Amino acid sequence: MNHHDQFEDRDEREWLAQERARLEARNPGATPSGDPMVARYRKLSHALRTPLADALPDDFAANVARLAQAGVVVDAPLDAPDATLERKLTNLFVGLFAIAAVVVAAMYGSQWLPPILGLLHLDSSVAVNWALALAACVGATWATEHLRRHKESTHAA
């Protein structure tokens, strides 16, 4: 028997134990097997069939509806200690990345900048079209964000 056959035999035993445990869990009157592997899978099968306890209070929906009608906005606190630490670390890493980018550009810019500029062909009409497409995307993003903020400010008032 080679190494591969051992894995197949073990997988088949596992599968048969899982199936037997599933069938025993469905039929509580059946005589349970003495196989410890089947007993473990029977516990697992029972746990998977047991419904989870409700984590929400009974009046949760009513409370949410009442808050929605009142127009209350519930925000997570932004000044939580974890949020402040994460914000500071993010700012630190962005700053370090910016410094590294400037250093790399200063050290190696003379080597990679001319080939990139040669690929862009900034004098071609294709470059102008891409620049216009970029400007349109940025403008559309800015306009939709401006409209969303305006709508929120007039809706909240």
Image (tube, grey):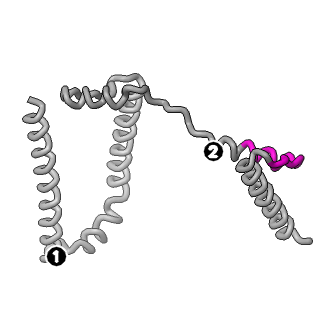
Which residues are the magenta region? 30-43
As drawn, 4 above or below 46 = below
Residue 62 in the image, given as x and y percentages of width and height: 31, 28
Residue 148 sits inside the magenta stretch = no
Q: What's the residue at 16%, 76% (across, down)?
A: 126
> Where is mark 1, residue-wise?
126
Q: What's the residue at 89%, 71% (across, down)?
A: 2
Judge by depth and name the residue closer to the eye, 139 or 97: 139
Question: How many numbered circles are shown?
Answer: 2
Between label 1 and label 2, give the one nearer the viewer: 2
61 to the left or right of 57: left
Q: Residues within 10 Å of mark 1 (few under 14, many from 20)?
A: few
Q: Residues within 10 Å of mark 2 (few under 14, many from 20)?
A: few
Classify the position of the N terminus by image quarter.
bottom right
Q: Residue furthest front?
A: 29
Q: What's the residue at 27%, 74% (across, down)?
A: 119
Query: What secondary structure is found at the residue carrying circle 2?
Result: helix
As drawn, 64 above or below 38 = above
> Where is mark 2, residue-wise?
49
